[in-house]
Amino acid sequence: MSTHTASVPYVEPWLRGTHGDVPAVARAVLHAFDLAIDDLTKWTDGLSDVEIHTLPLELPPVAFHLRHIARSTDRLLTYAEGGQLSAEQLTKLKAEEVGPQHDERETLAALLEEVKASFANASDRVRALANANMNTFRGVGRKQLPTSVGGALVHVADHTMRHVGQVVTTAKVLKALRG
């Protein structure tokens, strides 16, 4: 993770020369995790634990997206590895839903730590898949919808960044609504 200062320009992860020990597809996923942490840390800075649970302009709360980023990464990598979701993963999936069932004492710090821990675990799993045949079939879900190892890995990066974008947007709205 880098810090942003006026004297040191920010360089996106894919331009830092990191993760050169893994092939390009896996490297791109690892760079997406690095960028996600950079952006989540930057844009959620200053949000309160109450704000992350609010639905500004009916947008899903920041807390939902953080939970979803961490847990969906695990699920998508399970598919990339050729597995099916466990009962625990399915329970966590149901627990992600937006609604009053969430413990609003869940803190921003705890959710960011969940994302970081998820990415640390995911990085090891991505590295383990890095030299796999990217065209190897993988089935997703009960219906075994078709993808490949490479397709699942690329989707992990894409899906992560899609939800990071939602966090950034919602964080900006929350800060603007403060006045």
Image (cartoon, grey):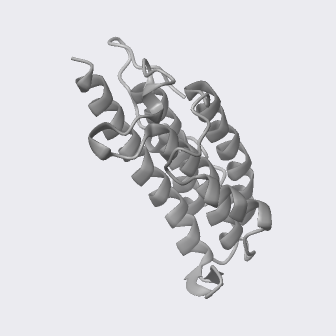
Q: Left or right of 61: which side holds 75?
A: right
User: Seen in the image, is 9 located left or right of residue 147?
Assistant: left
Give the x, y percent position of residue 41: 49, 28
Residue at the farthest top position: 7
Going by the picture, which residue comes out furthest to the left?
179
**In this image, 151 relative to 177: left or right?**
right
Q: Quadrant of residue 176?
A: top left
Q: Relative to 3, is 145 above or below?
A: below
For residue 144, above or below residue 94: below
Residue drawn at (40%, 46%), measured in percent from left and top? Answer: 60
- Residue 7, compared with residue 36, is above or below; it is above
Of residues 69 and 49, the one drawn nearer to the viewer in this rendering: 49
Q: Nearer the viewer, residue 101 or 72?
A: 101
Between 17 and 139, the one lying in front of the other is 139
Tell me which residue sits at (56%, 82%) in the image: 147
Pick the quarter of the image with the C terminus.
top left
Residue 9 coordinates in the image, percent (x, y): 35, 22
Residue 90 against residue 120 in the figure, above or below: below
Residue 70, horizontal then vertical, whole percent: 61, 48
Residue 13: percent from left, percent from top: 48, 39
Q: Is residue 157 visible?
A: yes
Judged from this view, the residue extending furthest toward the right is 87
State the residue at coordinates (66%, 71%).
80
Does residue 17 show up?
Answer: no
Q: Number of marks in the image?
A: 0
Q: Residue at x 48, y 46 (%)?
A: 65
Q: For the N terminus, which image quadrant?
A: top right
